[in-house]
Image: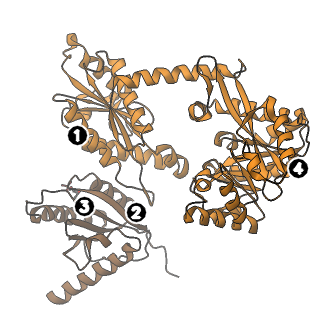
Amino acid sequence: MDASSAAPEGAIDSLTGLLQRDALLAALRDAATPENGGGQPFALLALDLDRFKTVNDTLGHAVGDALLRAVGRRIRTAVRGGDLAGRIGGDEFAILMGHPAGEVAAQALAARLVELIGRPFLLDGHSVVIGASVGIALFPFDASEPEPLLRCADLALYQAKAEGRGDQRRFRPALRARAEARRQMESDLRAAIALGQFELHYQPHVELGSGRLAGFEALLRWRHPARGLVAPGEFVPLAEETGLILPIGEWVLRTACREAAGWSDPSLVVAVNVAAAQLARRELAAQVKSTLAATGLAPERLELEVTETALLHDVTTATATCQELRALGVRISLDDFGTGYSSLSRLRSFPLDRVKIDRSFVTGIATEAESAAIVRAVAALGSSLGLRTTAEGVETPSQLAELEQNGCTDAQGFLFSQPVPSARVEALINRIAADRQGPGDKEAIAA
Amino acid sequence: MSGMQPALRRVIYVSHTVTDPDEPIGPVLASILTAARRNNPRIGVTGALLYTARRFAQVLEGPPEAVEAIFETIQCDLRHDHVTVLEVSAPTVRAFADWSMAFVADAPVRAETLGEAGGAAELLAMLQAAIRNTEAATA
Ligand SMILES: Cc1cc2nc3c(=O)[nH]c(=O)nc-3n(C[C@H](O)[C@H](O)[C@H](O)COP(=O)(O)O)c2cc1C
């Protein structure tokens, strides 16, 4: 049952030469139904290309089509005589393995597919390397009905992609539970804004040298009715995947501006994190402008923190948006510097006011020469470019001393305070002011 | 200024042999070269193939569509893997105009240097020199 010979004419996808979705699903139903001559054990592979969208976006649809055509050919090269391969979505494929198709045979085919599709493609003068991830499900062990079996293969595929792509995974029942938990979390997250379950906590950043409080970074927290306070690391990735980060980001911006406008010291800056998806939209500047107008916060008091990855995602839009924002008077800072891919020289071309040095360098500054050297280099470059440099995650007085010596201008971390709920911001403002006036002992701040 | 030159494409890649190390490689090489010498002239492709220490290095040049098509055929060949493209370029002249597929065995390169940056130019020069030497010896 070769894909191209056994199937009726119309059932072949003309681009890839593989079965069309409906034909593959029909064959899957037959294979799972004893009355239709099926019921024997078989394997189902779900395959997805890893960087297809990037190729399509950067080299155009014609090249994208040529790539799919070549992928179709490579899949046909990899499969065995009795296997059926089909294209079931834009860049999604499925392979129904005929007999014998136990776990070993399925893994061997998956490895062959991953290897073949991982080889370079030569398209329109470009050498293009994509990759493929594969999920494996076995009939009847993983599921005895066609649709659930496809779902199992898909879950295994998601797992392969989540664990770094370019590899294969076999379905495990735990994946089903995990997918269920994710679905639950997604629907909870959808409801969270309306139910008022989000809150902002504020962590101070302090000017080195003077010890003056410069402002606060607004940090998102989710007060989940059953799970308690959930840290952003546990829900932000899901929010980004589902697009919920946009309404959440808007809420954060609005709330941070409103709360900061009420602080007793009108010189304090509030720093708000901006996600890649927000930065990629041209509306961000307009949204910030109307939020400032609505809350009465002066533009100079708002600082937006962007990450390297968000900037690199779409450099042109990001640069234009940051320029517009700075024209409003809003400041831009680059968050987690050192963890992404940007080089020091790249800093020059982005419209920035501040660089925040990632905590991983700060942690080692008092004990490792390399960390100190990196911090010193970033601080020196920052000062020559007219940028402020904030060290994140400062926990000890000796780190603080090193940072001052190495030329950082600002610092943030547990040494000054952990993030506090909105209601405790005023007390913190007073405490830091009192600490400055008291005997100049920095240890006292650590309390 | 010369008139309209037909566009040329050159691709240079390296790969690993996946045939059984205990089997002689001769028949595999013969089969590849027979196919190349049968197919390449029909589509205007010329080039050179190096086999050394279980690695291949190949230069393919000709009309862009023809080079891209034969390259894709070769990518689907299960007798090699770990394919790395070193260069894709648009040269003005062919480096191996007289050869449907020149063959060089056990050339004076270390296999490890084949995939390194800057390796493409070095490889090309080495293959051209090896072929000139062969021609001189047999002339
Ligand atoms: C390293 C390597 C280089 C090859 N080079 C060529 C080539 O230049 N031309 C070619 O037609 N086939 C080449 N092949 C063989 C092709 O992969 C394929 O087997 C052949 O084109 C099939 O030809 P046929 O359809 O005429 O039998 C090469 C294979 C390998 C492994």
Which chain contains the residue that carries disc 2? B
User: Disc 1 to disc 3, how far (Cα)?
Assistant: 19 Å
For mark 1, does the 10 Å Cα neighbourhood hold few (<14), some (14 to 19), or many (20 or more) residues? few
Asked whether residue B67 is in view, the answer is yes
Image coords of residue A302 (percent x, y):
82, 44
Looking at the rendered structure, which numbered label has been put on residue B68?
none
Image coords of residue A37 (percent x, y):
18, 15
**Residue at the spot of label 1:** A108
Above or below — where is A373 with respect to A420?
A: below
Amino acid type of the residue tagged 3 in the rendering: His
Q: Which chain is brown?
A: B
Labels 2 and 4 in the same subunit: no
Which chain contains the residue that carries disc 1? A
User: Disc 4 to disc 3, how far (Cα)?
Assistant: 71 Å
Colour convention of the picture: by chain
Report which quarter residue B122 is drawn in. Answer: bottom left
Colour of the chain lettered A: orange
Q: Secondary structure at mark 4?
A: helix
